[in-house]
Amino acid sequence: MEFFIQQLINGLTLGGIYALIALGYTMVYGVIQLINFAHGEFFAAGGYIGVILLSFFAANGLLESHPWICLAASLVLAMGYCAMLAMAVEKIAYKPLRHASRLAVLLSALGMSIFLQNGLMLTQGVYDKPYPTSFSLGRFEVGQITVSYLQITIVLITIALLILLNILIFRTRIGKAMRATAQDKTMSSLVGISSNRIISLTFALGAGLAAAAGIMVGLYYGSVSYYMGFVPGIKAFAAAVLGGIGSVTGAMLGGLIIGLVEIFGAGYISGQYKDVFAFIILISVLYFMPNGIMGENVDDTRV
């Protein structure tokens, strides 16, 4: 039983990170029906901004004296940077192809993904960059169950970001404009909603969440690399599809399911096949529910 609870905690931690990344995929798709395959690179870029900032704070002695302020500042700055990067990518790679074929947009997304990944390699180097270890210290134990303070921090940050996103989408005028644009761009423009601004904002929000996930992954695993966005990006895309692409609630649920399946599969079966379990559950669910778990409930969950 203790092993099960330990794996459950680990799965929720990882699943929350996948959910943050998956939200970017599902929000962009919900608004413009585009799979942004460059989204994983925003996740990696956020991880790098985090390690640069936290290393700077550590070198100046601020990380030891004010660790949580430094972490909060790193999160805000990384999210802001990746939001602006995503808006620039949207303007350069996607906006000119707004009325082009889906194949052209898909190729542009793949090309931008390769461009950003190689840009990270050229600017940050080919070797992994280690995160400061200040946040990896400290844990408490209940029997054989071990929960680190870092895991608690990751879960709390994830919950806070998900709550704020839901408030923004379902309780604000900007959220109403996003949902209106997703449902009908022509009619929303007739009532004064700028679809171009809403699309840019959607890219920015998704990239900001991915950046926060990148920092949390860097803290959790201790380092970042220029290619770190590929595999989590694919798994997060699988989570978005599993939950129902275009559904915000579905993306959250899909991320949690993928994280739990991966951790329990690795713990009870084999860690060598942990990347396979996520796609097995995806195929199994889509076989019976082709639209995903919440793919049909678009009235109140679609961005």
Image: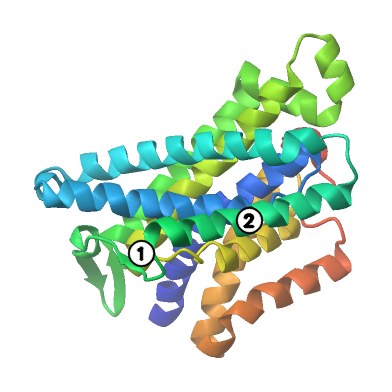
Amino acid type of the residue that numbered disc 2 sits on in the rendered structure: Ser
Label 2 crowd bin: few (<14), some (14–19), many (20+), radius 10 Å:
many
Question: Disc count in the image?
Answer: 2
In front of the other: 187 or 45: 45
Residue sticking out furthest to the front: 122
Residue carrying label 2: 113
Q: Which mark is residue 220?
A: 1
Q: Quadrant of the C terminus?
A: top right
Q: Residue at x 70, y 41 (%)?
A: 93
Classify 74 as above or below 269: above
Q: CA distance from mark 2 to mark 1?
A: 24 Å
Which element is circle 2 on?
A: helix
Relative depth, front residue between 191 and 103: 103
Q: Amino acid at mark 1?
A: Tyr
Mark 2 vs mark 1: give the one in front.
2
Q: State the image coordinates of residue 298 (x, y, percent, origin top left).
A: 81, 39
Q: Residue at x 39, y 56 (%)?
A: 216
Q: Quadrant of residue 220?
A: bottom left
- The location of residue 256, given as percent across then percent down, is 58, 60
Q: Secondary structure at mark 1?
A: helix
Could you say which disc has been placed on residue 142 in the image?
Answer: none
Residue 37 seen in this snapshot: no
Residue placed most toward the observer, 98 or 284:
98
Left or right of 12 in this view: 37: right
**Residue 74, placed above or below residue 279:** above
Q: Where residue 269 sits in the image (x, y, percent)?
A: 56, 90
143 up-or-down from 200: above or below: below
